[in-house]
Image: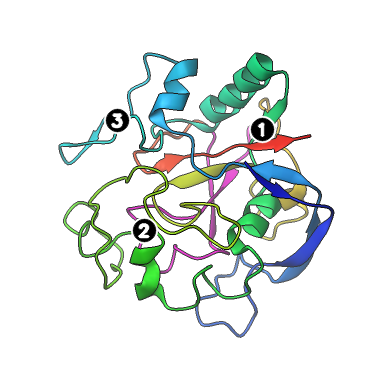
């Protein structure tokens, strides 16, 4: 876990004059309290301690199931239940990160569009993205003009971390947050969703299937809670 100290404020979203800005990335100041965030996405090995029968399955005949690869094929309810189980097992309060906590952690003090800078084709040093290695396995969006050496998910910690020492916050797999999704935030970015609410949840970070537009610190989408995908996982935070 990486410690985020004190009450920290920053500008969330994307400035109005930025070329890559989307309408749901309103630039605004937000503050987060102290928390610890996992250095790595939850792996198959870790998730199977909770649910031994879990299978992350295949993509284009490539296994997504290796122990050190991020768990995928989990809904928000699955991720939420894992944090409840982990809290019960350890006696400590584990949960998913709010959207504001997630973006604070991915930025690691940067104001650029990505934690390594603004250039998308530098991604392959830092992230597992849709690139020259994966373009035959993921159709649709544009590819990064680099080669990250992985056509599907990579073992966690394969690439360089951000300045806080956190790995794979961009790329590898999309990550569920704890926040209800709102197109204009509406303070949902700092709220916790209830497992009984039937609302979309914010997901962040992009994945091995994502082109340059989505692999940015401010990029955000909302997904229904029961969706399971081969490029969607999560990481945990710890309240002390």
What residue sits right under mark 2 in the picture?
A: 210
Q: Give the residue displayed 31% in from the left and 64% down from the top.
A: 141
Camera-nearest residue between 63 and 14: 63
Left or right placement of residue 128 versus residue 1 in this view: left
Q: Which residue is mark 3?
A: 65
Q: Which residues are magenta?
A: 197-225
Task: Name which of mark 3 and mark 2 comes first in the sequence.
Answer: 3
Report x, y in % for residue 43: 43, 33
As measured in the structure, the alpha-carbon distance from the residue carrying label 3 to the one carrying label 2 is: 20 Å
In three-dimensional space, the C-alpha distance between marks 3 and 1, rounded to whole angstroms, equals 23 Å
Along the line of sight, the residue nearer the viewer: 138 or 5: 5
Q: Which mark is residue 95?
A: 1
Q: For the N terminus, give its image quadrant.
A: top right
What secondary structure is found at the residue carrying circle 2? Answer: loop
Residue 141 is one of the magenta-drawn residues: no
Badge 2: how crowded within 10 Å, few (<14), some, or many (20+)? many
């Amino acid at each position: 876990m990486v410690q985020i100290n004190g009450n920290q404020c920053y500008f969330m979203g994307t400035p109005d004059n930025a070329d890559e800005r989307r309408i749901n990335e309103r630039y605004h100041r937000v503050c987060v309290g102290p928390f610890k965030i996992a250095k790595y996405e939850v792996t198959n090995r870790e998730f199977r301690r909770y649910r031994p029968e879990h299978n992350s399955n295949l993509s284009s005949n490539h296994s997504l199931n290796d122990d050190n690869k991020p768990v995928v094929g989990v809904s928000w309810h699955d991720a939420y239940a894992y944090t409840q189980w982990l809290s019960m097992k350890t006696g400590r309060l584990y949960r998913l990160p709010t959207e504001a906590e997630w973006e604070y952690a991915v930025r690691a003090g940067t104001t650029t569009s990505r934690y390594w800078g603004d250039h998308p084709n530098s991604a392959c040093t830092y992230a597992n993205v849709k690139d020259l290695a994966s373009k035959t396995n993921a159709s649709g969006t544009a590819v990064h003009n680099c080669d990250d050496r992985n056509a599907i998910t990579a073992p966690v910690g394969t690439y360089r971390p951000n300045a806080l020492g956190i790995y794979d916050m961009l790329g590898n797999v999309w990550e569920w947050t704890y926040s209800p999704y709102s197109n204009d935030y509406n303070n949902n970015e700092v709220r916790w969703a209830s497992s009984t609410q039937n609302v979309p949840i914010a997901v962040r970070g992009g994945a091995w299937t994502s082109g340059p537009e989505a692999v940015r610190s401010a990029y955000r989408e909302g997904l229904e809670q029961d969706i399971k995908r081969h490029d969607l996982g999560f990481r945990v935070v710890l309240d002390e």
